[in-house]
């Protein structure tokens, strides 16, 4: 066996022996991957901070200025529907996570989690959510605003 193959085998055995002891190896790939993940996380934080300084859901239709009382009520209903939808979806997602058998789950903890999840989804919908409220508003706004305009014309003609 050539000596260079022997030395590679010896090095591979030494590396494997180190990795089996729980000592993490520091490779260039690991360092680069860590740096990339850290940079990506920093970018996400900057983006979240930028959005927070502009205000919640600034780019969403349902968070724009209201035209009239009907428009305000429609936007409120759209946000409420999105919040309810997100709550139901989140509740079903939580059911897929197995409960810890070590500590169990008290009734008080279940109530707390449910209340926390409800409030979290309300805030998510208020901040723009997944865009469902915007889609519903776009679908319903023309008919609601048309009905409001007709009602105003009828009141003006009386």
Image (spheres, rainbow, N blue to C red):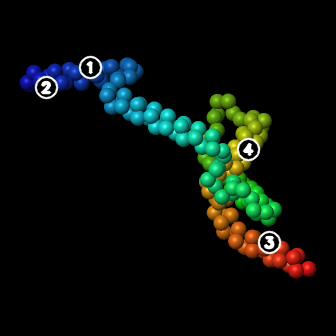
Residue at 60% in and 43% down? 51
**Marks 4 and 2, the one that precedes in the sequence:** 2
Q: Earlier in the sequence, mark 4 or mark 3?
A: 4
Name the residue at 64% across, 34% down: 101
Residue of label 3: 148
In what element is the residue under mark 1? helix
- Which residue lies at the image location 71% right of the left edge and 35% below the top edge? 105
Question: What residue is disc 2 on?
Answer: 5
N-terminal of the pair, mark 2 or mark 3, is 2
Please state the horizontal and vertical placement of residue 55, each as a whole percent of the image. Answer: 66, 44
Asked if residue 108 can be seen in this view, the reply is yes
Q: Reading the chain from its start, which is encountered first: label 3 or label 1?
A: 1
| Tally of numbered tags | 4
Q: CA distance from mark 4 to mark 3?
A: 32 Å
Judge depth for marks 4 and 1 and give the one in front: 4
- Mark 4 → mark 2, Cα distance in angstroms: 63 Å
* Marking on residue 119: 4
Horizontal arrangement in the rendering, residue 12 relative to residue 114 (left or right): left
CA distance separating discs 1 and 2 = 14 Å
Residue 88: x %, y % from top left: 69, 53
Task: Give the quadrant of the C terminus.
Answer: bottom right
Distance between the alpha carbons at the discs numbered 4 and 1: 54 Å
Where residue 59 appears, as percent x and y from the top left, is 61, 53
- Asked if marks 2 and 3 touch (Cβ < 8 Å), the reply is no
The image quadrant where one finds the N terminus is top left
Q: Tell me the CA gap for discs 3 and 1.
A: 79 Å
Q: Label 1: which residue? A: 14
Whether residues under marks 1 and 2 lie with C-beta atoms below 8 angstroms apart, the answer is no
Along the viewing direction, whichever of 31 and 110 lies nearer the viewer:
31
Element at label 4: helix
């Amino acid at each position: 066996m050539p000596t260079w193959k022997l030395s590679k085998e010896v090095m591979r055995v030494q590396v494997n022996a180190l990795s089996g002891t729980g000592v993490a190896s520091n490779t260039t790939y690991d360092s680069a991957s860590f740096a990339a993940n850290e940079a990506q996380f920093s970018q996400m934080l900057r983006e979240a901070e930028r959005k927070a300084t502009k205000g919640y859901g600034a780019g969403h239709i349902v968070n724009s200025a209201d035209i009239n009382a009907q428009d305000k009520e429609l936007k409120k209903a759209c946000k409420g529907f999105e919040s309810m939808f997100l709550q139901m979806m989140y509740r079903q997602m939580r059911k897929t996570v197995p409960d810890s058998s070590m500590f169990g789950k008290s009734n008080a903890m279940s109530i707390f989690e449910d209340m926390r999840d409800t409030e979290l989804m309300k805030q998510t919908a208020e901040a723009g959510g997944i865009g469902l409220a915007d889609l519903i508003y776009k679908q319903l706004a023309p008919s609601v605003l048309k009905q409001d305009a007709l009602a105003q014309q009828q009141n003006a003609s009386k």
